[in-house]
């Protein structure tokens, strides 16, 4: 693997994009065993197709941000639809190498390496590596003593109870949670609460509907921790310290982040999710990375260290010339 001294990270405004580019950067830095200057930038505000963004960049009708031109990277790591054409043009102008995460929606020849999830349809190419689910930077699970104390004060969990983190996703463009699905999920969670040995912590995604949040708050806020969205988000802290994690099946990224915590993960599968999501979860159930949430918890799981092993192995074998 070639050593890189200047790495440019391009993301859209989604936190998941930043998390996945940081994961790839971490993998690469471990492989090349050297330090590099890293610059991160967001690309936002483009609603037109990628091929048009690429064309307008090529004829200079759209100009890359001055900071992008001035940095001159050895390597670009990009994630998010609109970042792909910027990565392609910068590669052409600076002769650097580039890696894109997810479908670039422009010609694959503009990239040295493309990382595609197994659950996404994509033609097999020479410069394509497949990975399981979503990429996770494990440094997110590390906390200093002061940070731990801060989150403990916010959450205030009872000492003698087991900590259960509940990650709630939400609606997307094509699928929404029905009242019946929300109520069914709450009934399963209530079964845990009745056992009196668990302390439940609820976290919401940016897609969680107001009605879902309100139902959770009304049912559980008196005896559980329900994050209000205002204080520091304890997401990574809770993943790293929980005895169990429950996650709704509409979010592949949250599921993968939970799995990489190495704690037992249980998935609630709503009826109305995409076929590729169902396949992703089915594979995880078969391989023992997660279990289906049915209102009960257990710690009998297979080893999870293999979850992203294939990607790390392929990256270590792939040489960017």
Image (tube, rainbow, N blue to C red):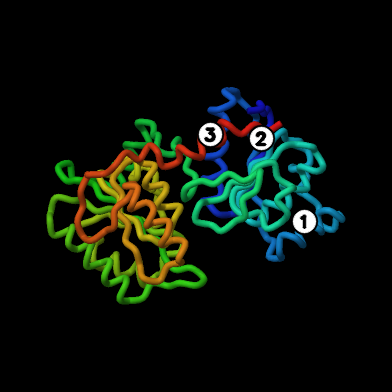
Taking the image as shown, residue 253 lies to the left or right of residue 56, namely left
Q: Which mark is residue 54?
A: 1
Per the image, label 2 sits on a secondary structure element best described as strand
Where residue 258 sits: x, y (%)?
37, 47
Residue at the image point whose x is 38% and y is 56% from the top: 281
SS class, disc 1: helix
Q: Are marks 2 and 3 in contact (CB under 8 Å)?
A: no
Q: Is residue 59 left or right of residue 81?
A: right
Is residue 41 at all visible to an observer of this figure?
no
Where is residue 128 shown, x and y percent of the image?
A: 62, 46
Which of these two is toward me, 314 or 223? 314
Question: What residue sits right under mark 2 in the picture?
Answer: 7
Q: CA–CA distance between discs 2 and 3? A: 13 Å
Foreground pick, 243 / 144: 243
Q: Nearer the viewer, mark 2 or mark 3?
A: 3
Residue 236 visible here: yes
Residue denoted by label 3:
27
Is residue 310 left or right of 35 when viewed as pictured? left
How far is disc 1 from disc 3 in space, using C-alphas?
A: 28 Å
Q: Are marks 1 and 3 in contact (CB under 8 Å)?
A: no
Q: Which is nearer the N-term, disc 2 or disc 3?
A: 2
Q: Quick one: label 1 or label 3, which is nearer the N terminus?
A: 3
Residue displayed at 77% across by 44% down: 90
Instruction: Classify mark 1: residues with Cα within 10 Å, few (<14), some (14-19) or many (20+).
Output: many
**Residue 294 horizontal/vertical position (percent):** 23, 61
Q: Pick out the residue farthest to the bottom.
A: 179
Which one is earlier in the sequence, the residue at label 2 or at label 1? Answer: 2
Residue contact between numbered discs 2 and 1, judged by CB atoms under 8 Å: no
């Amino acid at each position: 693997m070639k050593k890189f001294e200047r790495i440019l990270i391009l993301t859209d405004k989604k936190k998941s994009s930043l998390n996945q580019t940081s994961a790839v950067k971490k993998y690469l830095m471990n492989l090349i065993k050297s330090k590099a200057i890293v610059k991160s930038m967001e690309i936002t505000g483009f609603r037109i197709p990628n091929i048009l963004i690429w064309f307008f960049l090529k004829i200079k009708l759209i100009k890359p941000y001055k900071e992008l031109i001035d940095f001159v990277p050895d390597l670009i790591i990009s994630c998010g639809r609109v970042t792909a054409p910027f990565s392609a043009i910068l590669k052409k102008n600076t002769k650097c190498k580039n890696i894109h995460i997810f479908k670039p929606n422009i010609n694959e020849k503009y990239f040295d390496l493309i990382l595609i999830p197994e659950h996404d349809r994509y033609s097999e190419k020479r410069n394509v590596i497949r990975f399981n689910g979503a990429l996770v930077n494990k440094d997110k699970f590390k906390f200093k003593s002061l940070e731990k104390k801060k989150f403990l004060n916010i959450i205030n969990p009872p000492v003698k109870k087991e900590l259960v983190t509940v990650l709630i996703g939400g609606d997307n463009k094509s699928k929404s949670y029905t009242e019946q699905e929300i109520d069914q999920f709450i009934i399963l969670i209530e079964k845990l609460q009745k056992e009196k040995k668990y302390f439940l912590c609820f976290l919401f995604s940016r897609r969680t509907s107001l009605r879902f949040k309100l139902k959770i708050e009304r049912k559980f806020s008196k005896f559980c921790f329900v994050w209000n969205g205002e204080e520091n988000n304890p997401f990574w802290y809770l993943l790293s310290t929980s005895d169990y994690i429950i996650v709704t099946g509409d979010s592949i990224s949250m599921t993968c982040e939970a799995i990489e915590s190495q704690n037992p993960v249980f998935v609630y599968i709503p009826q109305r999710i995409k076929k590729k999501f169902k396949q992703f979860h089915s594979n995880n159930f078969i391989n023992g990375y997660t279990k289906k949430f049915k209102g009960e918890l257990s710690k009998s799981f297979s080893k999870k260290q293999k979850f992203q092993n294939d990607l790390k192995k392929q990256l270590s074998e792939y040489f960017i010339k």
